[in-house]
Amino acid sequence: MRTALTVVALSLLLGPVAGCDGGERKSIADQIGPASKNLSEVKTAPVVSPEELAKRRKEAGFVTKEEADAKIAAENAKMFEKGDREYIKARVKEYRALTADTRKLLDDIEKETAKWAAAKDPAKAFEKSGKDLDKRGKDLGKTLDKLSEKGVKGGNTQAILNKAFRPLDELLGALGPELGKEAAFPETLKTIRAALDEAEAAFTEIEKDETLVASKFAEGEGAEAADAGEKPKK
């Protein structure tokens, strides 16, 4: 009897313990699951280049602060340029007179320099007409300053005129009996005349632009007449 009880006790201690559902209990390793992957085995998302990222943002309609600021600046510049063109349209006759007088001055300088070079006494020949040419050139510069309010008005058209008047200033500063012999003299005349051509083409374009309201910048009766669609009274 004691032997039988001992066998039963040992079997209870050493035999497998059944779970509540009658199956065997899983080992600790099985309960934990498979080991984690090494870092080298973990897949990472592909790196996107700055160019590709910018492209995706643009396609999605994303606008950076720099792009927004640039857009506002461009719109403001366009608005100011329209105002400058209207300003010129109100004074286009004066601007055309200025370029015409400048052409005449260039023609006279070209003629006089040839006379100076051919004269027996170039210095004496220069004295007869040089000072007058210089004065005419400076007066034209003053006229441009008055029209453009010293470069403040005129926008892109003023920039074109500067391409003519800056080299003209240099030419006036170089006036002398030997100017016609200078290698750069013909090219300087060509540069100034080309800029005057460009300016006059801009005047024509401004005159034909019906979106420009010149009366905004006209004065006195001229402004009232322009608003009424009439020619200014003289």
Image (cartoon, rainbow, N blue to C red):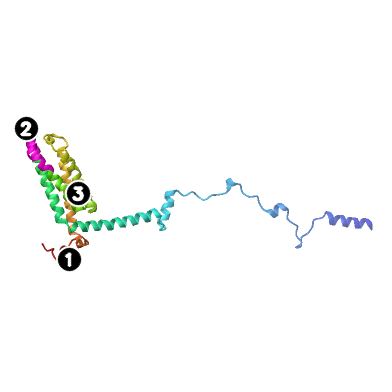
Which of the two discs, 2 and 3, labels the residue nearer the N terminus?
A: 2
- Residue at image location 28% in from the left, 58% down from the top: 79
Indicate whether 171 appears above or below 12.
above
Disc 2 vs disc 3: which is toward the camera? 2
Residue to which mark 2 is pinned: 121
Amino acid beneath label 3: Leu
Front residue of 126 and 211: 126
- Residue at image location 17% in from the left, 44% down from the top: 192
The main secondary structure of the magenta stretch is helix
Q: Secondary structure at mark 1?
A: helix
Front residue of 98 and 12: 98
Magenta stretch bounds: 112-134
Which of the two discs, 2 and 1, labels the residue nearer the N terminus?
A: 2
Q: Secondary structure at mark 3?
A: helix
Amino acid beneath label 2: Asp
Q: Quadrant of residue 80?
A: bottom left
- Residue at image location 28% in from the left, 57% down from the top: 78
Q: Quadrant of residue 20?
A: bottom right
Q: Is residue 69 left or right of residue 168?
A: right
CA gap between label 2 and label 3 equals 36 Å
Q: Residues within 10 Å of mark 1 (few under 14, many from 20)?
A: some
- Residue at image location 17% in from the left, 46% down from the top: 194
Residue to which mark 1 is pinned: 224
Residue to which mark 3 is pinned: 161
Q: Secondary structure at mark 2?
A: loop
Indicate whether 207 appears above or below 41.
below
Instruction: Say if mark 2 contacts mark 1, CB within 8 Å.
Output: no
Percent of width and height locating residue 166? 20, 44
State the quadrant of the N terminus.
bottom right
CA gap between label 2 and label 1 equals 58 Å
